[in-house]
Amino acid sequence: MVTFSFREYGENLGTRPLGKRVREQLLPLIEQNSCVVLDFTGVNVVSNSFADECIAKLLLEMPLAELRSRTTFKGLNPIANDSVLTALRRRHLTIKN
């Protein structure tokens, strides 16, 4: 198990360009490890744009079931949690249709 710390990218994660950069670093870790802890400890804000670009677009690389089995979340505050869940739901619906 390996931990990916989002705090290294700032306390406020808000833009698509940052989300893309982080996703490009995160994806190889997920592909090379059986379980990656997505650690948001110390992160105050996760915008919908960042959540979609960084987390939800991982669904373009692997099915939701695989993403769930290979990752776990840690340290998300309630508002950031809502942003991530909303982005995953929307992206999953887009892919299914």
Image (spheres, rainbow, N blue to C red):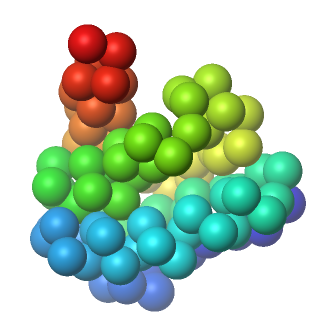
Expressed as whole percent of the image width and height from the top left, the position of residue 82 reads: 27, 36
Q: Is residue 4 left or right of residue 13?
A: right
Q: Which is nearer the eye, 6 or 43?
A: 6
**Relative height, residue 38 to residue 58 (above, below):** below
- The residue located at (43%, 67%) in the rendering is 23
Q: Is residue 69 visible?
A: yes
Q: Is residue 58 left or right of residue 97?
A: right
Q: Is residue 68 left or right of residue 75?
A: right
Expressed as whole percent of the image width and height from the top left, the position of residue 73 reads: 57, 47
**Relative height, residue 66 to residue 21 (above, below):** above
How many marks on residues? 0
**Quadrant position of the C terminus in the picture:** top left
**Relative height, residue 77 to residue 40 (above, below):** above
**Relative height, residue 22 to residue 38 (above, below):** below
**Quadrant position of the N terminus in the picture:** bottom right
Q: Is residue 77 left or right of residue 6?
A: left
- Please, which residue is most extreme toward the top here? 97
Q: Which is nearer the eye, 58 or 43?
A: 58
- The residue located at (71%, 58%) in the rendering is 31
Expressed as whole percent of the image width and height from the top left, the position of residue 35 reads: 78, 51
Expressed as whole percent of the image width and height from the top left, the position of residue 45 reads: 22, 63
Q: Is residue 42 visible?
A: no
- The residue located at (27%, 57%) in the rendering is 53
- The residue located at (46%, 86%) in the rendering is 8
Question: Would you identify the image quadrant in which residue 17 lies?
Answer: bottom left
